[in-house]
Amino acid sequence: MTPALSVEKIVKEYRAGRHAVRALDGVSLALLAGEIVGLVGANGAGKTTLLSVAAGRLAATSGTIGVPGAAPGSAGSRRVVGFAPDGAVFPPTLTVREVLDYYARLHVSGPRRAALVARALEIGGLAEVADRRAAALSRGFSQRLSLAQAAIGARRVLLLDESLSGLDPVARRAVCDRLAALAASGVAILLSSHDLAAVERLAQRVIVLHRGRIVREGPTTALLGERVLELVLDGPADRVPPGFRVTPFGVETDLGQGTVEAALALARAHRLAVRASRVRLRSLEDVVLDALEDGAR
Amino acid sequence: MLSRSAVAAEWRLARARLIRSRLGLWLALLAAGLAELGARAAVPDPAGLAARSGMMAAVLAVAFTAGSDADRAALPLTLTHPTTPLSLALGRWLGAVTVAALPMLAATTAVGIARSLSPLALLAANAGGLAAAGAAAACALALVWVGGNAGAGFLFLYIGVLSGLSPVGVRYLAPHGALPRAAEWMLALLPALWRYRVLAAGSAVAWLHAGLWITGGIALAAWRVSRR
């Protein structure tokens, strides 16, 4: 299957005084039609830089961006790839509808434009604020307008930078549902977010970025499929068994291929006062934190 | 390189600014003030009035349609859509010149009626004024996309206060010193009232100067946007 967007060995360096700072260090990824990929990592990991480079907003130091049927950085590729930056600024004095009409004019002309604007308003859930000045919108609505302008036209790839932040729970759920619907219609979505619960629910694949490198990548189901044994202890553990981590309520360990019985036996051998135990699946937060720890080593 | 619909999208932004910002008010004040001065002048000078009002209005229009922090911050997002820096610059320039033509026409028409000037003289004055406005708008666009509205403020004051003097006049008034020499260079290079006043009379040098500023200013503005 031809990727809707391919990123090959992207390096992006900035000059900071005399030093060169490498924001992206050989990042490669492929985005398939209809999939939502979560891009997660700590602040400064390079997520926004990666999205900006993929959108053609920043030039890469080296590496290539590929969009089928369009030259990199061309108007043709911008017709297909939409970018919703965090904290987007729109042309002042325009209403939400006029902002979308302004961007729609760059894609189509004639009567088809009205349909494009109506569809973008629907994607952003912006009907109630359509005639309000864009500059006066709350952060949540501004994020939705950013998403709507990204999805305008015949965009087949959406690059979303923190599009879920600043939204109330109801709006966030609504935006998640719209993103899922867009993906179901064949749009490929790369979603950068610190909202790991939303990424866990939406993304079929997750990429963890750390200091400009991909440190973990895989299908969400595979990453979250590992089991964790949590032990609640009566008191603090004097000796932590190998492979266990200390938690606020006791200890926990990844079971991997091992059994619960074996892990419990190890805990007893280390004289841990186990009050209760439970097995849960790993959360995306566990995966990301582990990946970041591994990447830091 | 250039998309007609993208140019039209940028051009249309000027209408919203004219109605919803203070741009309309400032242009009305400018037109009224210059018309009043023109009507009271000892010798009517429709060409000078058209050039001055067109240039000053063009700088104001650029400041309000392209030079604000929000306008400049919105440019990178626009460039993620199928447009080009040249379309963007050309559309904004066209919008500013269209807006600038309104007070220019109002001022010259008012003075023409008050001083019973011939329609042909007014037509030539307005054609020259439009070219002067185009040159000033292109220069202002390049300046504001490099340094923000401080550049527009400088250009507005320069056109309103200094640019009526020719470099020869500056040399006569202040023959020595670095500042007068700098002013001489500025008056020779930048769009200036003393040069564009003769556009209406068909001065080839003035038309060439204005034409170079229009093409060069738009190209410089487009280059600046592409580097953001």
Image (spheres, grey):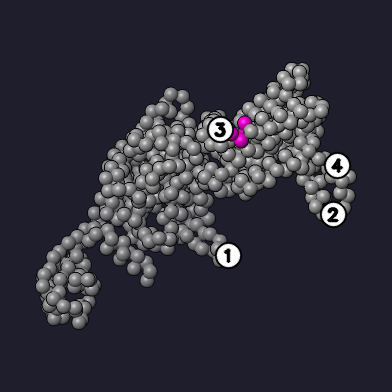
* SS type, badge 3: helix
| Sequence-first tag of 4 and 2 | 4
Q: Chain of mark 3?
A: B
| Sequence-first tag of 2 and 3 | 3
When asked about the image quadrant of residue B31, the answer is top right
**Are dots 4 and 1 on a single chain?**
no
Which residue bears the numbered disc 4? B169
Amino acid residing under circle 1:
Gly
Distance from Cα at disc 4 to Cα at disc 2: 15 Å
* SS type, badge 2: loop
- In the image, which disc is placed on residue A5? none
* SS type, badge 4: helix
Distance from Cα at disc 1 to Cα at disc 3: 42 Å
Residue at x 65%, y 29% (from the top left corner): B103
Residue at x 46%, y 24% (from the top left corner): A110
Give the residues drawn in magenta, as a range: B24-28
Left or right: residue A186 versus residue A80 is left
Amino acid residing under circle 4:
Gly
Q: Residues within 10 Å of mark 2 (few under 14, many from 20)?
A: few
Distance from Cα at disc 2 to Cα at disc 3: 42 Å
Which residue bears the numbered disc 3? B18
Distance from Cα at disc 4 to Cα at disc 1: 46 Å
Foreground: disc 4 or disc 1: 4
Amino acid residing under circle 2:
Gly
Amino acid residing under circle 3:
Leu
Whether label 4 touches label 1, CB < 8 Å: no
Distance from Cα at disc 1 to Cα at disc 2: 38 Å
Which residue bears the numbered disc 1? A17
Whether label 1 touches label 2, CB < 8 Å: no
